[in-house]
Image (spheres, grey):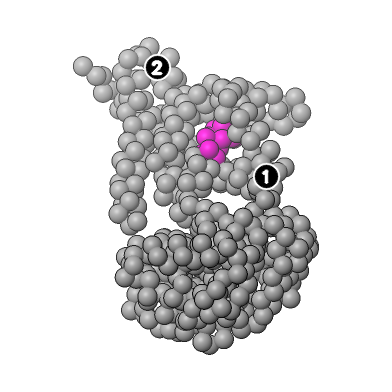
């Protein structure tokens, strides 16, 4: 479903991604971890071309993104993205936030889009906030709306870029619960996170990345018990014992 | 004491000037807002040639006097067999001139909308134009309203230089009355009052709108 082949990316002199080879299959839940500045967010953002790669081949959902002639808007219909800072549209209500892309991109009717939006709002457990503005919601609620906004496009893949990092601790659980439910339904998910509990419970694989290189690609239990890479071991002990 | 008979005896002329100023300002306001928005988008669009066009326009127009633009249109274009009335030439000049300032105000507003908004909109499959129109511009407009209001007030005041091409606006009528009656002081006081009738409500309106939008955030 997602395939990186010898992918490199440079920001000027900075080699953010260094020879990435990675394959993610349909229905897999893959968690990407790594120290800050390791390139994990960049890796994720390449998957819906918020960042373009400098070198190599990248194929996502049957579309070769490294090909210059790709219709990016068509491609993005099928890939949802959830951001660290939610990025809800502050001038629109919750319902309008969720309906915008289905109406404008999928050309759904307003009624149909509204029905879908309400369905997903119920699913993430905040149906009663449909007419509220984002500023009237807590961080956890905003992030759940953002997830509903992504799901309303009925995507093949959902990308999560540190979805709980900007949340107060007591709100992390409600967002992770929604993500767990989604994983159980078989959604293909790529999640950049430091939530090791989530990773252990839900992930099929854990990818450890540092200095733009994938140093570990392992089963969660395996990764926890005995990371092969020294840097991964160090990182793990630091986030588990903080 | 002010001589109010000057006002009452020449009221028709004052009124005509007032209405013409309103008309010129209204047309130039609409025109410069549309043109300014397009130029602002040109300046930030991810397409290099558009950036250049936007930048060249803004830097040229903003840095030359309005009077030169006006003369160029009114006396320069006839060289190419394009003859415009003072009213039309004046409205065009005001529009072209003000658009440069409006473009800068709107550009600043667009750039102050957090980057994540564009990213969220684009990731959901919206095109750049759709994202701009449905997500970025509605947020930018709030930020832009105070500077935009100032530009509109400037536009109304700047319309007074159209007197030079006999556009028939307020200043022109004032000059006419004054040269006919040899009264200067009183006439120009009344002219100023007529300008205030347009600009003060504009100024108060912008203040109120600003407060209301601040609350809705």
**Horizontal side, residue B197 vs residue B124: left or right:** left
Q: Percent position (x, y) of residue B38?
A: 60, 46
Residue A74 visible here? no
Q: Read off the chain for label 1.
A: A
Residue B44 visible here? yes
The residue drawn where x is 72% and y is 42% is B49
**Toward the viewer: B14 or B103?**
B103
Q: Are marks 2 and 1 on the same chain?
A: no
Q: Is residue A178 above or below residue A47?
A: below
Q: Read off the chain for label 2.
A: B
Q: Secondary structure at mark 1?
A: loop
- The numbered mark at residue A12 is 1
Q: Which residues are magenta?
A: B91-104
Magenta-colored stretch includes residue B103 = yes
**Toward the viewer: A75 or B13?**
A75
Residue A89 image-quadrant placement = bottom left
**Horizontal side, residue B44 vs residue B116: left or right:** right
Label 2 and label 1: CA atoms lie apart by 67 Å
* Quadrant of the frame with the C terminus of chain B: bottom left
Q: Secondary structure at mark 2?
A: helix
The residue drawn where x is 38% and y is 71% is A172
- The numbered mark at residue B78 is none
- Which residue is disc 2 drawn over? B178
Circles 2 and 1, Cβ within 8 Å, touching? The answer is no
* Quadrant of the frame with the N terminus of chain B: top left
The residue drawn where x is 43% and y is 29% is B157
Magenta-colored stretch includes residue B64 = no
């Amino acid at each position: 479903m997602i395939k990186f082949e010898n992918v490199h990316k440079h920001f000027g002199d900075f080699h953010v991604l260094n020879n990435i080879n990675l394959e993610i299959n349909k229905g897999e839940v893959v968690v990407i971890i790594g120290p800050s500045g390791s390139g994990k967010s960049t890796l994720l953002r390449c998957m819906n071309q918020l960042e373009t790669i400098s070198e190599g081949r990248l194929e996502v959902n049957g579309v070769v993104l490294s090909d210059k002639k790709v219709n990016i808007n068509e491609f993005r219909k099928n890939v949802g993205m959830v951001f660290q800072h939610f990025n809800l549209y502050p001038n629109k209500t919750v319902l309008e936030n969720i309906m915008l892309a289905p109406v404008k991109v999928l050309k759904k009717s307003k009624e149909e889009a509204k029905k879908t939006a309400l369905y997903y709002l119920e699913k993430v457990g905040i149906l009663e906030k449909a007419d509220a503005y984002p500023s009237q919601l807590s961080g956890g609620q905003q992030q759940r709306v953002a997830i509903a906004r992504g799901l309303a496009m009925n995507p093949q893949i959902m990308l999560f870029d540190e979805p709980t990092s900007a949340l107060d601790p007591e709100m992390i659980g409600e967002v992770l619960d929604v993500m767990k439910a989604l994983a159980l339904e078989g959604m293909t998910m790529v999640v950049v996170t430091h939530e090791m509990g989530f990773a252990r419970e839900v992930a099929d694989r854990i990818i450890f990345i540092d200095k733009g290189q994938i140093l570990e690609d392992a089963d969660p239990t395996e990764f926890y018990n005995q990371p092969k890479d020294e840097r991964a071991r160090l990182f793990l002990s630091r986030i588990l014992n903080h | 004491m002010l001589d109010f008979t000057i006002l009452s005896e020449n009221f028709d002329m004052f009124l005509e000037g007032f209405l013409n100023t309103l008309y010129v300002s209204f047309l130039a306001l609409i025109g410069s807002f549309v043109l300014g928005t397009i130029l602002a988008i040109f300046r930030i669009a991810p397409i290099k040639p558009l950036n250049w066009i936007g930048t060249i326009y803004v830097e040229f127009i903003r840095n030359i006097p309005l009077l030169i633009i006006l003369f160029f249109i009114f006396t320069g274009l006839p060289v190419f067999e394009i003859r415009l009335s003072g009213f039309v030439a004046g409205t065009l000049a005001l529009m072209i001139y003000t658009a440069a300032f409006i473009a800068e105000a709107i550009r600043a507003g667009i750039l102050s909308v957090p980057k994540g908004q564009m990213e969220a909109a684009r990731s959901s499959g919206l095109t750049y134009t759709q994202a701009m129109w449905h997500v970025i511009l509605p947020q930018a407009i709030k930020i832009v309203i105070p500077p935009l209001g100032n530009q509109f007030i400037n536009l109304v005041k700047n319309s007074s230089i159209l007197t030079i091409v006999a556009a028939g606006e307020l200043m022109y009528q004032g000059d006419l009355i004054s040269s006919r009656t040899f009264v200067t002081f009183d006439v120009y006081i009344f002219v100023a009052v007529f300008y205030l009738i347009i600009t003060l409500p504009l100024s108060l309106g912008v203040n109120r709108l600003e407060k209301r939008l601040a609350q809705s955030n």
